[in-house]
Amino acid sequence: QQQVKQSPQSLIVQKGGISIINCAYENTAFDYFPWYQQFPGKGPALLIAIRPDVSEKKEGRFTISFNKSAKQFSLHIMDSQPGDSATYFCAASLALYNFNKFYFGSGTKLNVKP
Amino acid sequence: DGGITQSPKYLFRKEGQNVTLSCEQNLNHDAMYWYRQDPGQGLRLIYYSQIVNDFQKGDIAEGYSVSREKKESFPLTVTSAQKNPTAFYLCASSTQAGPYEQYFGPGTRLTVT
């Protein structure tokens, strides 16, 4: 059973537009929700993260919106640029005996057209 | 520079051979992880280790083995028992205390023919 469900699988956005990627989870014990950006042939890089006691977090053009009651969170990329074209993964972390296990969504391939 | 290094970047092996992927970190993180990435499937956890000389199976450990003799190193061996070993392998590490940020290495692409 997939713990974190991500949509859409792919996304095409015009330069300057807003990119929105959504994730949903089931386990209410998750306590940390990061987003990763991955370029082809590279490892994922931590982009932005949020804890469930906060409804929104913004860092530059990237914003996480978190809806605890709906068990959903989303990544918004404002003023999307061609350099943002990459695969984005959401994740959720679960604390297990002083260790954190991460569950990942299946990824969204973003293409920002010039 | 602090970070995670993986070597080699590309690895080619014949079916039936064991192969070991290297992972080294200088972030002073206690926890280390190995993930497998296949197209359209996200990241799947193979093994993880909380401290030296201790490691646990993840969700897809069959056909893989690991060791953790040093805090900085967490090598992964892909054995001949792994039925579909061709994939992109990612090593990661994280802090044990908050904010639990997990950092990834650049990955090793393994091709078995």
Image (cartoon, grey):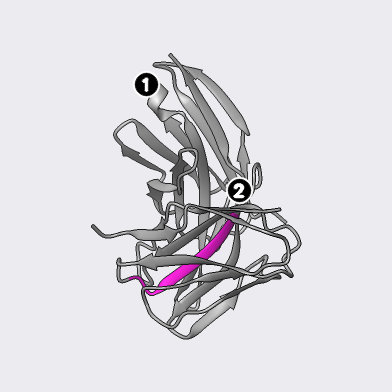
- Residue A6, compared with residue B95, is above or below; it is above
Q: Position of residue B97 (x, y in %)?
A: 35, 71
- Give the magenta range: B29-36
Q: Which residue is mark 2?
A: B42
Residue at left offset 51%, top offset 37%: A87
- Kindly identify the amino acid type of the residue bearing the numbered disc 1: Asp
Is residue B84 or residue A69 the one in the foreground? Answer: B84
Residue at left offset 41%, top offset 44%: A55
Q: Which mark is residue A79?
A: 1
Is residue A91 or residue A56 the one in the foreground? Answer: A91
The furthest residue to the left: B1
Q: Position of residue A30 (x, y in %)?
A: 52, 60
Callout 2 touching callout 1 (CB < 8 Å): no
Q: Position of residue A96 (x, y in %)?
A: 52, 73
Is residue A7 or residue B113 the one in the foreground? Answer: B113
Which image quarter is the C terminus of chain A in? top left
Q: Which mark is residue A25?
A: none
Using a 10 Å C-alpha cutoff, classify the residue at mark 1 as few (fewer than 14 neighbours), some (14 to 19) or many (20 or more): some
Q: In which chain is the residue bearing label 2?
A: B
Residue at left offset 37%, top offset 78%: B71
